[in-house]
Amino acid sequence: MQRDLVERARSGDTDAFTDLARAAMDRLYAIAYLILRDGDRAQDAVQEALVSAWQDLRALRDPDAWDAWLHRLTVRACYRGARRDRRRTLIEHRLASNPPPAHSLDVASSIAERDRMERELGHLPIDQRAVMVLHFWLDLPLTEAADILDIPVGTAKSRLHYGLQALRRSMIDEPGNPVTLVRERTA
Amino acid sequence: MNEDPMLERNVASTFAAAAPSRAPAGLLDPIVTSVGRTRQRPRWLAVLKEPPMRHASRVVVGSPTARVAALVAATLLLGLLATGAFVAGAQSPSPAPAELEAAAPPSFFTGNAPFSGACQIASPTTEYVDGVTKKRGESWVCLTWTTDDPRFSGVSKNIYNTDAYIPASGPVGYLIAGFERIENDAGAWEGTWTELRIDTFDEIAGWFIGEGAYDGLVAYVIITDIQGSASVYGVIKPDDGFGAPTAFVDE
């Protein structure tokens, strides 16, 4: 079914392309959102990726690679968007580094942990976050993530390794961990 | 990877909690509109532009060899052009403007007419018949002609029909026929053209009839490299009835 739609879209059928875009949009938006951490920029990235897909669809040799190619276009659009907004991102990061809203002691620590993890993920370089999103959220093997990112598998592995290492370190050292936060706020 | 299964599980669950389950309503509409207004790139150009992608050790997008070949060809072409320009410059000085003016009429001109792709005024109807995609009545404005003859410069409006044959493999072919009007402050040119694309070859040729200040003149125009520089080559001449013979003359 999808293969047929891709073939029709490749020969210029806009209706077939619309069906393909509709089917992929939620997934692409989630990928872009997780990489960029901003709804507006994620929308821009998805739009840019899908319009690029339409324009260059005739470069797609194997219709079965449609999803993988869309993932690549989306990640690329995220990189471009992040470069465009680097200045804004820096400001956001600074804001995000402020202590998060106060959690009282009885709030489940798992929620606080997740908040902190989410914040730390946002501090990682975008290329490390992209590997993590493809590997941990889309559940793709690293070889496939490397194909999508157009990097050698070794590079994908090292980005993942350094990303996890940074997370581990920050989860231990970060002054914003729940215990420290609670101390600060109850002092 | 499994270097820290607990941390990896935490990352996965954090992503799962943070990922929006649906894209915002209304995101599809601007995409559909953009797609309706944007022409797909011909395969040769898409293959050159799109970085190759491998999947399970197979090339599934683009062509690494085509990109390298294009780069080599472009480098060679630039080298040839630079050498040619140097030799021509050394051997024959450019004629003075007065000499160029004395060479008219007919007046030959060159320029560009790039397809902006931004101002579609009518979407085509599309049908797929026996392997041919038939688009009818696609219409655009704001395509700007800029030539070294200000008479044949201006903004155009055109409408055209397309028959496209795009096989799964082998060369793609397009036959496109259009009607176009180019206007500037002094007058206008109106005429029909035909475009033929076979893979990397893509040319338009057509006759135009002058109006206003250009009344009594005709122009014959060719456009090459339509998806790229859209280079224009043309001639303006008096409408003296010149054209192809309509029959063979018996001896």
Image (cartoon, helix red, strand yellow):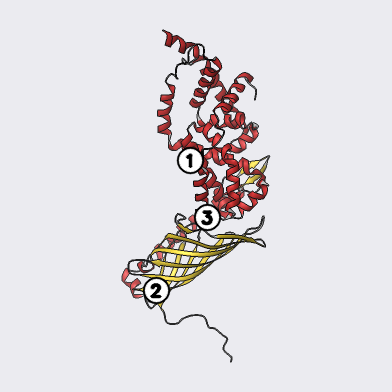
In the image as oriented, which residue stretches furthest toward the top? Answer: A187
Query: Which labelled disc corresponds to residue A44?
Result: 1
- Circle 2 residue: B210
- Circle 3 residue: B39
Foreground residue among B177 and A160: B177
Please tell me whether mark 1 sits on a helix, a strand or a loop.
helix
Q: Chain of mark 2?
A: B
Foreground residue among B15 and B7: B15
Q: Chain of mark 1?
A: A
Give the distance between the C-alpha atoms of the residues marked 3 and 1, in whole angstroms: 20 Å
- Residue B5 image point, x, y percent: 64, 20
Please tell me whether mark 3 sits on a helix, a strand or a loop.
loop
Say whether marks 1 and 2 touch (CB < 8 Å).
no
How many numbered markers are drawn? 3
Q: Residues within 10 Å of mark 2 (few under 14, many from 20)?
A: many
Give the distance between the C-alpha atoms of the residues marked 2 and 3, in whole angstroms: 30 Å
Tell me the amino acid under the disc marked 3.
Answer: Arg
